[in-house]
Amino acid sequence: MYGKGRIIPALILFLGVMTSPMWYKSGDLSKLPKPEKPKDYKECVAPTAFMRTSHMVLLNQWRDNILREDGARIGKTANGTEYVRSLQNGCMKCHSDKKKFCDTCHNYASVKPYCWDCHLQPKEAM
Amino acid sequence: MDSKRRDFLKIAGLSAIAGIAVPSAFNSLLKGEAVASEHGEAAAANAAAGAHGAAAPTGKRWGMVIDVKKFAANPGLAEKCVSTCHAIHNVPDFGNKKDEIKWIWVDSFEHVFPDDSSQYKKPEALESMPFLTLCNHCDNPPCVRACPTQATFKTKDGVIAMDYHRCIGCRFCMAACPYGARSFNWREPRGKNADGQPFIKEINPKFPTRMRGVVEKCNFCVERLTIGQIPACVEVAAESKALVFGDLNDPASEVSQVLKTTFTIQRKPSAGTHPSLFYII
Ligand code: SF4
Ligand code: SF4
C-alpha cells in the first residue's frame, strides 16, 4: 500500500482518539451514578428494575390515564400503601431531592428531560 | 406480420380496459348495496329510539351559571374569583396587556356579548356591571377541532382540558375560539421582570407552571373536580351564590334548577359552540 508507513499509525491514532471516552471510564465503577434513595420509605410504586428503565413510560401512562381516560389519581403499591399518581405530588414526596436523585442519573446519561420546565421540585427556589 | 401485431395490440387494449372497468363496476355495485343497507339500519335505529334528532345525553356535563346581578351587588367579588384562580394555578402576570395570560377575567357587557342586538338601547346599569368571563367549556368546541396534536380535548365530563406536554404552540385553538378564552405564553412564565419581580408572585407547589411557547386556559379546576371539590372561583362566590356550578345533564342538580326557573343567556349562541356557561343579567 502506498504511504503505509503514515496511514496505519494515523488510523490507529484516530481510532484511539475516537474511542477514548470508552477507555477513559471503563472499569471504573466509582464513576457510576449513585442516586440517593429516600430514607423514610422502603417501597416504590413498582420494582426497582422496572423503575430504573421505564419510569418515564410510567409517568406518561399516568398522565394519559388520568387526564384522558378518567383514571384514578390514587394508586396502591404491592403492599397496599396509597400514593398519588403524580410526579410533582407523588414521586417527589419520597424522592424529595431532585438534585440527589433525578439529576445524578440524568447527568450521567446526559439526558435532559423537560419535566422541570413546568413541574416544580419540592421547595424550588424561584 | 403487421396485421398480427395490430390484432395483438387490439386484444391487449381490450383486456386492459376490461381489467380496469369490470372490477370497479363490480365494486361500485357492491358499495351501492352497502350504502343502501346502512341507510336502512340507521333508519331502523332511529325508529327504535322513537326520537327525533339527537338522543338524550348521558353522563356528566359540568356547567355554570354566572349571576351578574349578584356580582354587581358584591363589588370586588369578581376580582377575588380571578385572583384566587390565578394564584392556585400559577398563572403569570407579565404586567402588560399584550402578553397577558388569563384563565378568568372581568369584562364589559359590550365585550362579552358583542352580538347583542339591543346594545344601542340598553339599560344604563349594564355599563358598570362586572361580567366574569372564562372558557365556556363548549359542548361543540372549535378549539378541540382545530388542535392538530390533540393537546386540547374534551373529557368524559364535558371539560375542555389541555395536555401542555403535547401543545406545540401553533395557536390554531386561539384562532378557533370565538371567546378569546385562550392565552399564549410569549414569555417564560417563571421569569422575572426588569425589577427582579417574578411573574408568578407566589408559587403554588401543588400545581405545575407552564413554559414559554404553550397556550393555556381555564381547566374548570379538573384537578379539584376529580377529588370531589368544586372549582375555586365557585367556592369564592359560594356565599353569595353568584356562581352556581353542577351537572347540566342531571335534572335535579342546582344548576339545572336555576336554568329551569331563570332566564339566562349564553355568549355568541350563533357560533354554534353550545357553551356550558350561562349568564343571568
Ligand atoms: S370557550 Fe373557547 S377555549 Fe373554551 S371550549 Fe369554547 S372554544 Fe374552546
Ligand atoms: S397551540 Fe397547542 S393547544 Fe392550541 S391548537 Fe396548537 S397544539 Fe393545540
Image (spheres, rainbow, N blue to C red):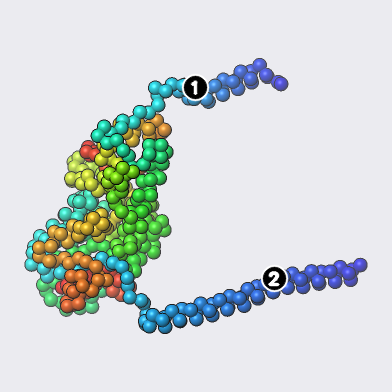
Residue position marked by numbered label 2 in the rendering: B20
Left or right side of B123 for B147: right
Left or right side of B215 for B200: left
Residue position marked by numbered label 1 in the rendering: A23
Ligand 2 closer than 8 Å to label 2 CB = no
Residue A65, compared with residue B177, is above or below; it is above
Residue at position x 36%, y 62% from top?
A: B144
Chain for numbered disc 1: A
Q: Can the viewer see residue B236 in this picture?
A: yes
Q: Can the viewer see residue B110 in this picture?
A: no
Q: Amino acid at mark 2?
A: Ile
Q: Which mark is residue B64?
A: none
Which x, y percent locates residue B195?
Answer: 18, 41
Which x, y percent locates residue A1?
Answer: 71, 21
Ligand 2 closer than 8 Å to label 1 CB = no
| Co-location on one chain, circles 2 and 1 | no
Q: Amino acid at mark 1?
A: Trp
Name the quadrant of the N terminus of chain B: bottom right
